Image (cartoon, rainbow, N blue to C red):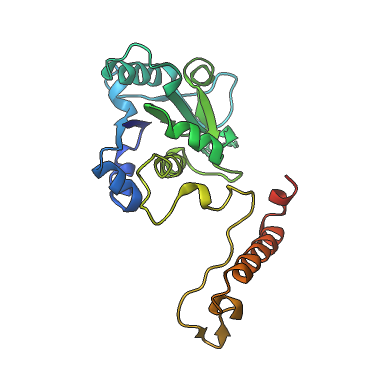
Amino acid sequence: MLRVDIITIFPDYFREPFDYGIIRRARAASLVEIKAHDLRSWTSDKHKVVDDRPFGGGDGMVLKPEPIFAAVEALAEARRREDIGPTKRVVLLSPQGKPLTQSLATEFAQCEQLVLVCGRYEGVDERVADVLVTDEISIGDYVLSGGEPAALVVIDAVIRLIPGALGSETSASTESFSDGLLDYPHYTRPPEFDGKKVPEVLLTGHHADIARWRRQAAEEKTKRNRPDLLKK
Ligand code: 9D3
């Protein structure tokens, strides 16, 4: 059973999104347990302050280290496991992180515990990344307002890789990215819609021809939308 603990200043952000589809099923089957924790509950001052001004000056605020250290320590302690070693990962979601990849998601899916720390404001005190964090991760080159949506993305990508989380209709290994190409185009009924016809070969039942067409279409789509994938 994978345990996912999210450390955030917006725990309510995570109230609904795990109640749908594959994640809901995985939770119902006890393949994963997900809990969002309020970073402010690990402050010790009256006003529950989690941020402070940056040393050296500059705009914005920085998340203080103490509440985050206290949170990660408390979550490890709560599991009553001194050291679950490489099967526990502490992930900081940050624009300065390494890109999330399918292979990293596969590693996370084999963990017993994932602790996701959501950055906010201008960033997180670097001692968190230096001492506490095993993986500093970004989900792409665009600017979010915090780590919370990135945590959702990581959780979604990871949970569907847990054995038993996907239905029998799909297997994670036969999907897009496993052979370095985008998926081929899909069609269903009707065979003609708004004057646009489904490619004839898909209606023939000639499986070898269909396989060839799909391969070709996947290559063309990859060339057009993701030429960077072909160069690898
Ligand atoms: C001007 C410098 N910016 C850093 C590139 C400031 C800044 C932007 C966005 C500081 C924090 C954030 C909040 N973003 C995240 O916490 C974040 C993120 C993202 O913005 N893009 C892609 N992946 C991620 S993971 C966490």
Q: Nearer the viewer, residue 131 or 55?
A: 131
User: Where residue 32 sits in the image (x, y, percent)?
Assistant: 31, 36
User: Where residue 169 sits in the image (x, y, percent)?
Assistant: 39, 57
Image quarter where the N terminus lies is top left
Q: Nearer the viewer, residue 58 or 221?
A: 221
User: Where residue 43 sits in the image (x, y, percent)?
Assistant: 31, 20
Residue at 57% x, 67% y is: 185
- How many numbered discs, if any? 0
Q: Is residue 118 left or right of residue 127?
A: left
The outermost residue toward the top is 82
Image quarter where the C terminus lies is top right
Residue at 31% x, 15% y is: 81
The outermost residue toward the bottom is 195
Figure check: 124 above or below 77: below
| Quadrant assignment, res 114 | top left
Using the rendered image of the protein, determine whether residue 119 is visible from the camera's viewpoint: no
Using the rendered image of the protein, determine whether residue 54 is visible from the camera's viewpoint: yes
Q: Is residue 133 left or right of residue 67?
A: right
Q: Nearer the viewer, residue 95 or 161?
A: 161
| Quadrant assignment, res 140 | top right
Figure check: 75 above or below 178: above
Figure check: 154 above or below 220: above
Quadrant of ligand 1: it is top right
Residue at 52% x, 85% y is: 192
Residue at 31% x, 44% y is: 26
User: Where residue 58 sits in the image (x, y, percent)?
Assistant: 59, 28
